[in-house]
Each structure stands twice: as C-alpha cells, then as structure tokens.
C-alpha cells in the first residue's frame, strides 16, 4: 500500500454507532433516518426537496427518466466519469457532447441546443463549480438543466450551492466522495414538487400503493443504515471541505515555482470549490506518476479516456479522435494528487518535494 494514499474516507465511532442504532430500531429500508437525511440534505443545499437513491448513477438515470428525455438529445461533457453519459443512454436518450474549458468544466459557448435537445447536463468536475448562470442561459427556457454534482457536495457558485441551480441536482455518496454513506448512495435535489414525487415513485418500483404500480420503476432505494451514516457525515462536511481547501492552497504554494506543473483553479469571488480532487496538469504525466509511485505516493488519472473515445461510444455513435480536443488534451495531462481531510501538511510537503525533485533532476 502507498504510504500516502490518494483518498481515504473518514469513518468514526459516531458514524458506526448511528448505523447500528438504525439497524436495531428502524425499518431497514426507507426507515426514519432516510427521510431525516433527505430533509437535512435539502436544507443544506437550499432546496425544497431531496430524494435519496442507491447511487449517483441512479440519481442521474432516474432524473433523466422523470424529466422525459427518451428519444431526444442530452448535451453533456465528454470529460467526466463514463456514468454521466451512460445514464443518458440508459434513459433512452442520445448523448451529445460540448467541449470543456481549461478547468475541465463544460464550456457554455459550446452548448448549442437544437429542436431535439431535452436537457443540458453539466458536471461540476473535481468539485469546481461550472458556470451555471451561463449554462442556464445557454439552455434556454425549454431545455431542462440537470447538474451532475456528484463531486461537488457543498461547492458554491455566485452564492448558491451546486445542486440548487438547475431543475435538479444529482449527488453521489460513493466512498471516495467528499462525504459518503458508508457504501453506495445518491441524492437528487430539486425545487419541483412534482418531479420529487415522480422520483420517489421511480426509486420504489414505480408503486402508488403496496402492490399497485403505474410506471416501470426501479429498486433504487437508499438503505436506512447508510442514511444514518450519511447524516453524521453531513454535519462534518463544511469543516472537511474547508480542510480540503486549505490543503489545496498548500499544494499550490509549494508547487507555484515548478514551471512544468499547471495548477487547478483555487476559487474566485464567484466560485467556491470543494476539491473532491486536486488535479494538476503536466506534459509527462505518466512518468511523473511512476516516479511518485516509487516514492510511496498514490496518484490517479481522472480521466485517461474521454467518454467519446470509450470503445462503446466509438462503436455506438461513431466518435473519433479530434472531436473534442480540449477534453482529449486534459485526458493526456491530468494527474490527481493525494487529498482528503486527514492528509497532513507534512505529507503535502513530501509530495511536492518529490515533484520538485523530479523536475529539478530533469533540467
């Protein structure tokens, strides 16, 4: 195992105890903790409704289905985890891509809805907010906006949290996210009461009563014990995010004089990122990663193959190299460095020292 891991979830006795209490005292599925977690999360994001589901991918899929995108087009980013576009395909829609800005987020100027466009699906990549005001304007009044906020728990854009800008926001609670539920889980946020009701039905087999179903639903519920775990995590999210920002600033300070390294945006008056990942860019990404691995430092590549160049997307839709050059460029140069709340300052310094030594030795 790496001496300095890329990520590590925080698990405390309080979280374990919350799960145990839920198992002992509540229904194991859709118990009281599930509904309390939804209320807590909606309040945190600043919306009227939050609907929990079994994963971030299901959050995207059920939202797309509930908004009726079937047989139409959804514009999204080619530079994301493949689940973003997979959800579009599974919802019966056609994924259309818009290339990204240097920070990895979808470029509003590349979003050009047509008559067949049902929705725009921007990704808040690495926990850095996309330009939501420009994207909402680009979508126009007749196109839905669904935020893939699976990496952006607590991120803020122009005073409003990610997940509160569009018609819906989708979150993942996978174990490496800024907060987790002790396993897979997801959440959908919205101010649309009817959409929330449709989502609650879709996640629970499409039922309108115990044995009566009026839509083809799914079994996509969040387990009660996971919700109890998530409620405790949510109470710590802001302090963990602030810790991530502090560590990101330390990385930036220690690496500012390494000319070969391009640093990620640290935030602005408009955008408050939460650094799900701290991603640098460098021309010899793979060689640097190998050097760090030899020093006991785990790194990651998010993401080495853009979605449009995944074999299944090439085969199904005919995409090829050069279609989205900015995304392809990022895929060739992005390197994720260790970042999690319990990472120590001296560990950040060690990682930066190894990077400086690597480039110093090559000059």
Image (cartoon, rainbow, N blue to C red):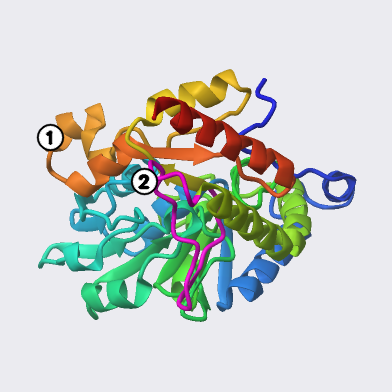
Foreground residue among 310 and 64: 310
Foreground residue among 11 and 242: 242
The secondary structure making up most of the magenta span is loop
Which residue position is annotated with label 2? Answer: 80
On the image, which quarter does residue 49 sit in? bottom right
Instruction: Point out residue 12 in the picture as x, y percentages from the top left corner.
Output: 84, 45
Helix, strand or loop for disc 1:
loop
Q: Quadrant of the N terminus?
A: top right
Helix, strand or loop for disc 2:
loop
Q: Residue at x 82, y 46 (%)?
A: 19
Foreground residue among 71 and 40: 40
- Residue 208 in view (yes/no): yes
Instruction: Point out residue 90 in the picture as x, y percentages from the top left corner.
Output: 32, 43
Residue 320 numbered mark, or none:
1
- In screen coordinates, is 7 left or right of 140? right
First in sequence: mark 2 vs mark 1: 2
Instruction: Point out residue 223 in the picture as x, y percentages from the top left corner.
Output: 68, 47
């Amino acid at each position: 195992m790496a001496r300095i891991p890329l990520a590590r979830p925080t698990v405390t006795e309080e979280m374990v105890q919350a799960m145990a209490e839920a198992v002992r005292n509540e229904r194991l599925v859709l118990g009281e903790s599930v509904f309390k977690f939804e209320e807590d999360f909606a309040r945190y994001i600043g919306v009227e409704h939050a609907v929990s589901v079994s994963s971030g991918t299901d959050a995207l899929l059920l939202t797309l289905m509930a908004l009726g995108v079937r047989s139409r087009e959804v514009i999204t980013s080619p530079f994301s985890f493949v689940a973003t576009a997979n959800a579009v395909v599974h919802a019966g829609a056609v994924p259309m891509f818009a290339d990204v800005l240097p920070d990895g987020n979808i470029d509003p100027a590349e979003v050009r809805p047509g008559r067949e466009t049902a929705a725009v699906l921007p990704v808040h990549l690495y926990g850095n907010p996309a330009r939501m005001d420009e994207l909402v304007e680009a979508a126009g009044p007749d196109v839905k906006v669904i935020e893939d906020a699976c990496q952006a728990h607590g991120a803020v854009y122009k005073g409003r949290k990610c997940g509160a800008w569009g018609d819906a926001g989708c979150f993942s609670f996978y174990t490496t996210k800024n907060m987790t539920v002790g396993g897979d889980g997801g959440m959908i946020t919205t101010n649309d009461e009817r959409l929330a009701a449709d989502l609650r039905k879709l996640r629970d087999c499409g039922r309108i009563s115990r044995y009566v179903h009026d839509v083809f639903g799914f079994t996509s519920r969040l387990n009660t014990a996971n919700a109890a775990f998530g409620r405790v995590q949510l109470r710590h999210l802001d302090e963990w995010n602030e810790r991530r920002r502090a560590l990101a600033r330390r990385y930036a300070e220690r690496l500012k004089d390494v000319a070969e390294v391009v640093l990620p945006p640290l935030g602005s008056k408009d955008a408050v990122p939460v650094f799900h990942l701290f991603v640098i860019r460098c021309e010899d990404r793979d060689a640097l990663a190998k050097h760090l691995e030899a020093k006991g430092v785990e790194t990651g590549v998010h993401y080495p193959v853009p979605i449009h160049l995944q074999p299944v997307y090439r085969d199904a839709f005919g995409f090829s190299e050069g279609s989205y050059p900015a995304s392809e460029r990022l895929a060739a140069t992005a390197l994720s460095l260790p970042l999690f709340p319990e990472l120590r300052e001296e560990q950040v310094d060690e990682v930066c020292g190894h990077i400086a030594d690597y480039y110093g030795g090559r000059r």
